[in-house]
Image (cartoon, grey):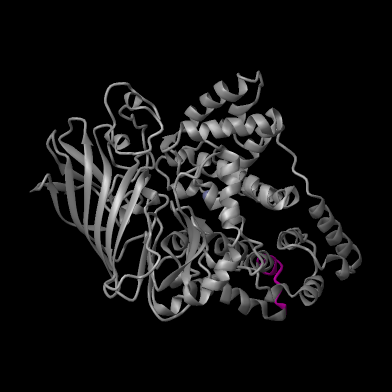
């Protein structure tokens, strides 16, 4: 956070456990933001009090958003709004005029509200509409229990403005309270202090006392229950899922302890995970205090729980120290992947962490190949002005970001790296930072301090991967590669020697099946290892990709792929499979499946696949 030393920043003053002494708290200067209409250097929101009614019949949320604001003398405050029906606006208790500017397909509309220089509070009365992009309304059939409808939100990157009128820039942090009215048979939970049992009247009150970025405001409503794992961790899920979810995530307290041991206290009091219905578009979303997760990670053997380590790591990188703009997204994700690997190593050992890192390394190679015609998109620091921030949410931010930090660690040594990261999180806690500020902090506090030279600028501001990259090795994966090579050369495979492979080893095996495999060999592998019928969603996804690429149709795999694509809405999975259809010139087949699948997808998944397949409603 940059400081000007002129005025007190009232939002920070409201924090009870503020890290800095009061006299050092100053008015924040906000950087230029390509994805928000807000003008926070003129007037900025500091606290939201949301009072809404969730109506499953009309699929509309309606109510009021009341904001405390800090006005630096402006005559208007500008909020972001997209597909919202704005009914009226008040400023300090009196109706005031407002204007909705021109509609932009990506950014929505600026909501310009007239205020006085002394205005402290504004109230916006509004409805969501059927065009909202953040909300996904599911009917009972789309849930695990199939008894009641379900609703969840997805705010990242710029979708919160489609369910709450707000200054929707990650550099603007607010605290919030909410009162949410839902049908009495359902429970509401948010990225806030949450209920553990249902109320009788369907009214829920929430408080988020730590200031967060608007993309982290989240709501889920469904017939869910809570089960604790420790006094500060637990899970929410539908009744038929709660036992499985509780077993799968039983290491959560150990993960929080391992994370604290690495980079300092967990500052959000509670860490819970809610497992959503399968249409949830991401693996997980790090909503503070309550991670939202896909059910595709419930494998029955804890093999895919690195996802929880990842979302937990965001409690530091992303939620505590937040990218100032989406051009700095790698600061959220690269750091989080690095932290995730360290948590996995602390809990399950170096070999497991290296396997995960190598899978990411292969993802990075595939991403570099797919972006070879747009090399600027392979820089860590992006320029997404005029483009959707989603364009930057790929393996570059995650896996190149990770590789940068791992290479840095191997250069300076782990001890110095850890001390540096711990101080970085502490210094920037509950604030936002951009790439340039990070680089100068790195130079001063790690490199110059230890007299180390490092090609930071090349890593961050140049395309591709520099030559000094860390080389990641896994003995287990070397064995996998040898086994696959022997099979390709001889058609023989020593089944007895691989009965104890982990899902990561199987994923590596399948992903590395070479181009020249024959249909007969695909059939042999499928008959022996039953890939088509695997219950592990990750192995299924990589196998289905190979089946599509190689025109393999054995063991009824086509109907399995269709079932997968019409049930699961996790964008990474479905995008991978639809890309495979496209690459194999099978777009017509893909479109037949997509028409059936699309109603189950959240807007972020649907818009990606619409673009990929050239689909128009
Ligand atoms: Zn992440």
Residue sitting nearer the eye, 381 or 471: 471
Q: Is residue 288 left or right of residue 249?
A: left
Q: Is residue 381 left or right of residue 125?
A: right
Magenta-tinted stretch = 545-554
Q: Position of residue 9 (x, y in %)?
A: 29, 31
Q: Is residue 555 above or below residue 493?
A: below
Quarter of the figure that contains the C terminus: bottom left
Position in image of residue 91 (x %, y %): 13, 45
Given residues 570 and 549, the one toward you in this image is: 570
Taking the spot 29% from the left edge, 42% from the top edge, the residue there is 37
Q: Residue at x 61, y 43 (%)?
A: 338
Q: How many marks?
A: 0
Is 439 drawn above or below residue 592 in the view shown? Answer: above
Task: Report x, y in % for residue 60.
Answer: 27, 67
Check the image and name the residue furthest to the right: 490
Where is residue 143 drawn, in percent x and y?
45, 75
């Amino acid at each position: 956070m940059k400081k000007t030393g002129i005025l007190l920043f009232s939002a920070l003053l409201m924090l009870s456990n503020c890290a800095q002494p009061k006299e050092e708290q100053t008015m924040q200067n906000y950087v230029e933001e390509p994805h928000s209409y807000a003008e926070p250097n003129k007037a900025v929101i500091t606290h939201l009090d949301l009072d809404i009614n969730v109506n499953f019949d009309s699929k509309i949320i309606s109510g009021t958003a009341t904001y405390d604001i800090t006005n630096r003398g402006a005559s208007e405050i500008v909020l972001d709004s997209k597909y919202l029906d704005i009914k009226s606006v008040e400023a300090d208790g009196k109706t005031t005029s407002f204007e909705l500017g021109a509609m932009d397909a990506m950014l929505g509309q600026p909501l310009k509200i007239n205020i006085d220089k002394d205005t402290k509070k504004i109230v916006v009365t509004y409805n969501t509409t059927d065009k909202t992009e953040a909300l996904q309304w599911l009917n009972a059939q789309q849930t695990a229990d199939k008894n009641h409808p379900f609703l969840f939100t997805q705010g990242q990157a710029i979708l919160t403005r489609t369910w709450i009128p707000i200054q929707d820039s990650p550099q603007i942090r607010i605290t919030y309270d909410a009162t949410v009215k839902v049908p009495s048979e359902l429970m509401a939970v948010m990225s806030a202090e949450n209920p553990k049992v249902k109320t009788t009247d369907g009214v829920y009150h929430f408080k988020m006392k730590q200031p967060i970025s608007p993309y982290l405001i989240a709501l889920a409503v469904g017939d869910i229950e809570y089960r604790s794992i420790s006094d500060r961790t637990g899970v929410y899920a539908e009744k038929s899922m709660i036992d499985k979810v509780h077993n799968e995530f039983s290491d959560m307290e150990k993960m929080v302890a391992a994370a604290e041991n690495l980079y300092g206290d967990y500052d959000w009091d509670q860490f819970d995970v809610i497992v959503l219905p399968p249409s949830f578009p991401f693996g997980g979303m790090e909503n503070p205090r309550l991670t939202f997760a896909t059910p595709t990670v419930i494998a029955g053997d804890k093999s895919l729980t690195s996802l929880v380590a990842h979302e937990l790591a965001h409690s530091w990188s992303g939620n505590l120290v937040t990218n100032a703009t989406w051009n700095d997204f790698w600061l959220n994700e690269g750091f989080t992947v690095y932290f995730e690997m360290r948590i996995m190593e602390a809990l399950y050992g170096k070999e497991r962490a290296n396997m995960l890192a190598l899978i990411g390394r292969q993802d990075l190679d595939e991403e570099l190949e797919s972006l070879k015609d747009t090399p600027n998109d392979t820089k860590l620091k992006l320029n997404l002005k005029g483009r959707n921030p989603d364009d930057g949410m790929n393996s570059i931010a995650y896996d190149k970001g990770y590789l940068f930090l791992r290479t840095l660690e191997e250069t300076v040594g782990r001890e110095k790296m850890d001390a540096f990261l711990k101080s970085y999180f502490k210094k920037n806690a509950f604030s936002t930072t951009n790439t340039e500020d990070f680089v100068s902090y790195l130079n001063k506090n790690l490199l110059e301090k230890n007299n180390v030279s490092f090609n930071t600028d090349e890593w961050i501001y140049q395309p591709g991967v520099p030559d000094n990259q860390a080389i990641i090795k896994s003995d287990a994966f070397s064995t996998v590669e040898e086994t696959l090579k022997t099979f390709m050369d001889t058609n023989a495979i020593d089944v007895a020697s691989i009965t104890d492979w982990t899902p990561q080893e199987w994923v590596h095996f399948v992903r590395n099946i070479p181009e020249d495999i024959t249909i007969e060999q695909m059939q042999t592998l499928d008959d022996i290892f039953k890939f088509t019928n695997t219950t592990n969603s990750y192995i299924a996804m990589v196998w289905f990709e190979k089946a599509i690429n190689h025109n393999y149709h054995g063991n009824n795999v086509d109907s399995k792929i269709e079932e997968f694509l019409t049930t699961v809405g996790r964008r990474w999975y479905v995008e991978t499979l639809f890309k495979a259809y496209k690459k194999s010139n099978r777009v017509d087949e893909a479109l037949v499946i997509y028409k059936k699948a699309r109603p189950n997808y959240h807007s972020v998944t649907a818009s990606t696949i619409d673009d990929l397949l050239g689909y128009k409603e």
